Amino acid sequence: MQELIGRKNEIEELERYAQSAKAEFVAIYGRRRIGKTFLVNNVFRNRLAFSMTGIIDGSFDEQMHAFADAMSLYGNKLEKTPKTWLEAFSILRDYLSKKKRLRRRIVFIDELPCLDTQRSGFVRALGYFWNSWASLQDNILLIVCGSATSWMVSKIIDNRGGLHNRITQEMHLQPFTLAETEKYFSANGFSWGRTSILQSYMVFGGVPYYLSLLRKEQSLANNIDRLLFSSDAVLSYEYDRLFQTLFNSPEPYKHIVKLLAENKSGLTRKELSEKLGLKTGGNLTMLLQNLIRCDFLRMYNVKGKKIKSSSGIYQIKDFFSLFYATFLQNNVTTNEHFWTDHIETPTLNTWYGLSFERVCMSHIPQIKKALGIDRINTEYYSWRSRKQVDNVQIDLVIERSDGNVNICEIKYYKSPYSIDADEEKRLDRRVEVYKSETKTNDGVLLTIITANGLKMNSHSDKVSASVTLDDLFSE
């Protein structure tokens, strides 16, 4: 089996559940292609007492055949396929009862949402299996997994029926960090430097499956053209499949992502409501919550005199979705070498600048560590001036419990960032507007986050702290 890269904390957690002295019911969820199945199979390998996988878009009968086939693979060939999930879980119970000698009876049910076909009664049967028997077995570890995050949360983790409060552990599997991505490339023989790794992250995020498609003998630009712009691009249909797998009605979700891709600084709930023609509550709330749960979006609180979640700013979090919605969703080009042909053009440089901001927002712990405040309680948020003309927006503010606040200016340059007289005035104004409108009494520390550091000159003494690309690669 392929080597497992990163996931140190997740591996430790899974092993802890395996060593537990009580029954454990673990729900693992996360974005499609993130490596949930690979993680479980790699950690437990030959330790699984039973494992089965739901069939994507499969019918009830097909799911039942999948269960019977899985039973056969584990040496328990059934004379007939079960007709209900209650019957299937009864068979599983009897099978596991014969495995009492195992130190830990580990059961893994993958693609769980697929098994919940219409009127199948799957969730109720699962609840009965756990409540009536499995929860009473000290050496049972039941792991369920699914890419349809909104389903996993609503039907399993936040279930209001038989599974209410039955999940003993939950694990939200996140994309790789830059450090984990670098380890992946190193383990697979890539000789790319950190700038190329950063740029690949801006396109593919830390999604292991997408990274696995990259070829070390090709440049990053050639890889991007091959995977996304060529006539037979491997990922040409990935965006649509991603939404279709996660949501029964994907179009409203894609519309929100498209709107946010067109508004790079993000939109408030009110702004989204106006552009979508939807009321701010009800259906819009559900759509936004599901997109956040599925790792498409993040919501930043904003600050006036106090932090207000009701006026938070929504931004695209998923790098691949942002890239696709920007460059491919509207068929903006038929050039199969689009990315290679546009290197060093304003189009790509602007894109890299915006994407670098998103990378930084995905690495707040690393930024705090670089600033030496990783052990200080903080709130971080986005901030917008309330002025209608020439207003100021600050993408990242870190408010600290020690009476200071970092106002972060994020810049993507291939050379050290240099502050001239005009730039100094602009930075001064941002700080002054923030102080004036928030009425803060905290010390305000101007912080520069840039790929290649800050060039020291007569204007650079305005900067209290600097964070570089190498800092973002820290563990």
Image (tube, rainbow, N blue to C red):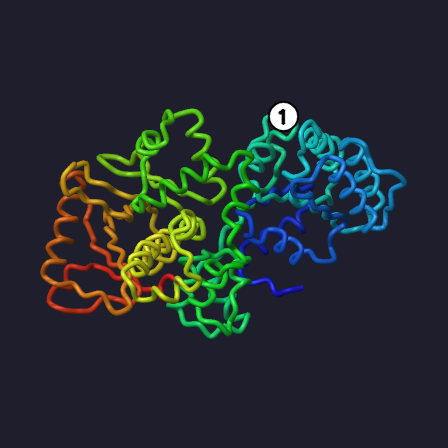
Name the quarter where the C terminus is drawn: bottom left
* Residue lying at the far front of the rendered structure: 334
Depth check: give the residue in front, 106 or 85: 85
Residue 111, position as x, y percentages in the image: 64, 44
| Helix, strand or loop under label 1 | loop
Q: Is residue 228 visible from the viewing direction of this image?
A: yes
Assign the N terminus to one quadrant of the image.
Answer: bottom right
Residue 473 visible? The answer is no
Residue 8 in picture, x, y percent from top left? 54, 58
Q: Nearer the viewer, residue 257 or 418?
A: 257
Where residue 86 appears, x then y in whole percent? Answer: 77, 31
**x and y percentages locating residue 421 in the rendered image:** 9, 61
Residue beneath disc 1: 161
Residue drawn at 73 percent across, 39 percent down: 63
Query: Quick one: 247 or 295, which is closer to the camera?
Result: 247
Residue 79 falls left or right of residue 441: right
